[in-house]
Image: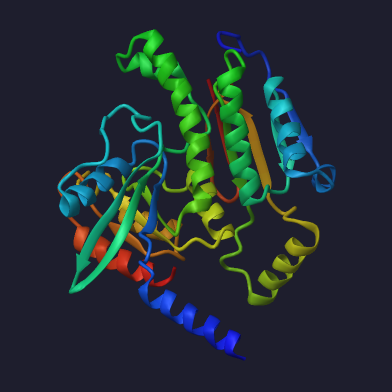
Amino acid sequence: MLKILKSFAKRILQSMFRQREDIKIGFYGPPNAGKTSIANKICKDWTGEELGIVSSIPHETRHVQFKEKVDIEYKGKKLAFKIIDTPGLATKIDYEEFVERGIKKGQAKKRAKEATQGIIESIQWLEDMDAVVVVLDASENPYSQVNITIIGNLVARKIPTIVVANKTDLKKAAVKKVEAAFPDYEVVGISAKEGTGFDDFYEALFRLSKKI
Amino acid sequence: MRNKKIKGLSLQVIPFSELRGLSISERVKKILGLVLSDKIVIVHGRLRAEEEARLIEDTMAMVDHVKNFKGIELAVIEPDMKNESIIVKIKHDIAKTLVGDSSALTVVGPASIIKEIKKDPKKIELFLN
């Protein structure tokens, strides 16, 4: 009996004093949707440092990169996140597309090789996420198979998810179209370039954290 | 595969029954094997989400190792159930659970041949390179 009581007290004390781990938030989506731009804005706002390099050439992020202890405060509440930026998912990689964008052939081939490995890495990291922010380009067709595959995998793994429709600064941007494509998800329209919509994003992020 | 002039398209239909007994690896291997031989594969049914992810992973590994292989184009066409009654939806879900999702069609082709797949619930358009 004494043993049981001791073990119970130990568990209670451990749960009271155990430091809560950072909430692991993964940024997933197709290439060039603005995952790194959003992750940079969040990290800059709350830690003063950016996370990665941004480029208009697809597959700039070719390795998973993250920042720990990103303490975000919203409406008096504070949560600690681990922000994980992942390489964009795609079903094809052609080094010639990089050459067309001005990258030398050797570098383009290297970039393509790294990009393929980055995609594999992204998928493998999915298992470790507490929650995911799916970042889509609001000016592109949301019904692409890659987007559907990402969402399908999050559903299968029961990972809480929000969808961000980025690039609302573009004329072609249609947040409503993204909402129509993913009616079961909270969709937040933002522009990482102009820094708009982030209040709604943080509100959605805090709501998402409750589902973990 | 690059610079090859396309004189015709080779389509290979895989009935769902051919995939049913296979493991994830075997299913993906079978599909990618056909894609590597320049065939456009039409699977009667849809892969599970984790199988689609595995298909992308294995495709990327092959892009890395197979000369001139650029990857795949992938699309799934499913019946539009939005306007169906709850009973029809339930029947569809039960059938899906029991025998797998054979009401959908999955199209997978080599990216060197298919530039883009556009779809709507009733038709599919393949744009060739």
The quadrant the C terminus of chain A occupies is bottom left
**Viewer-side residue, B92 vs A162:** A162
Q: In which quarter of the view is residue B65 placed? A: top right
Relative horizontal placement of residue A123, taking residue A168 as reference (left or right) = right
Residue farthest bottom in this picture: A1
Picture layout, residue A22 above or below residue A30: below
Picture layout, residue A99 above or below residue A153: above
Picture layout, residue A99 above or below residue A15: above
Image coordinates of residue A113 in percent, x first then y, are: 48, 21
Relative horizontal placement of residue B122, taking residue A163 as reference (left or right) = right
Relative horizontal placement of residue A48, taking residue A138 as reference (left or right) = left
Residue A207 shows up from this direction: yes
Image coordinates of residue B92 in percent, x first then y, are: 71, 66
Image coordinates of residue B100 in percent, x first then y, are: 76, 56
Image coordinates of residue A112 in percent, x first then y, are: 45, 21
Question: Which residue is drawn at the image coordinates 22% and 49% (left, top)?
Answer: A43
**Viewer-side residue, A103 vs B7:** A103
Instruction: Please say which color scheme the image uses.
Output: rainbow
Question: Which residue is drawn at the image coordinates 26% and 41% (left, top)?
Answer: A51
Looking at the rendered structure, the number of numbered marks drawn on it comes to 0
Picture layout, residue A32 above or below residue A183: above
Question: Which residue is drawn at the image coordinates 61% and 50% (left, top)?
Answer: B49
Residue B123 shows up from this direction: no
Q: In which quarter of the view is residue B94 placed? A: bottom right
Question: Which residue is drawn at the image coordinates 62% and 17% (left, top)?
Answer: B66
